[in-house]
Image: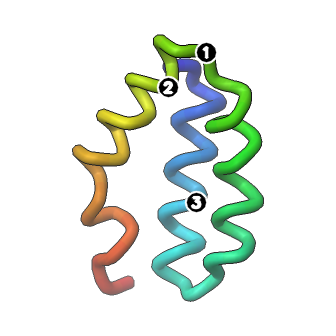
């Protein structure tokens, strides 16, 4: 996965934890929709592995 993609996902997780879901979606959606099939698989796995990043208390 590209560093820029990982950074966008990490930022989206941070925004979600801060109750800024619309901003989180605006951050993550472009990198998710631009990903090819291989990067999409990596994104899917990253989201599975990091689900707690989106829900834990700040």
Among numbered discs 1 and 3, the one appearing first in the sequence: 3
* 1 with respect to 50 (left or right): right
Q: Earlier in the sequence, mark 2 or mark 3?
A: 3
Residue 5 coordinates in the image, percent (x, y): 60, 32
Residue at 44 percent across and 33 percent down: it is 43
Q: Residue at x 69, y 35 (%)?
A: 33
**Residue at mark 3:** 12
Q: Do the numbered discs 2 and 3 sit on residues whose CB atoms are within 8 Å?
A: no
Q: Secondary structure at mark 2?
A: helix
Q: How is the image coloured?
A: rainbow
Which residue carries the number 1 mark?
36
Q: Residues within 10 Å of mark 3 (few under 14, many from 20)?
A: many
Foreground: 14 or 35?
35
Residue at (69%, 49%) from the top-left corner? 29
Circle 3 sits in a helix, a strand or a loop, which is it?
helix
Q: Are the two marked residues, 2 and 1, in contact with CB atoms closer than 8 angstroms?
A: yes
Q: Residues within 10 Å of mark 1 (few under 14, many from 20)?
A: few
Give the residue at mark 2: 40
Relative height, residue 1 to residue 25 (above, below): above
Neighbour tally class for label 2: few under 14, some 14-19, many 20 plus, Cα within 10 Å: some
Is label 1 in a helix, a strand or a loop? loop
Eye-nearest disc, 1 or 3: 1
What is the CA distance from the residue labelled 2 to the residue labelled 1? 6 Å
């Amino acid at each position: 996965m590209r560093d820029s993609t990982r950074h966008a996902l990490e930022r989206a997780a941070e925004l979600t934890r801060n109750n800024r879901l619309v901003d989180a979606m605006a951050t993550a959606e472009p990198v998710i929709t631009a990903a090819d099939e291989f990067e999409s698989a990596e994104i899917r796995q990253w989201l599975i592995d990091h689900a707690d990043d989106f829900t834990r208390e700040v």
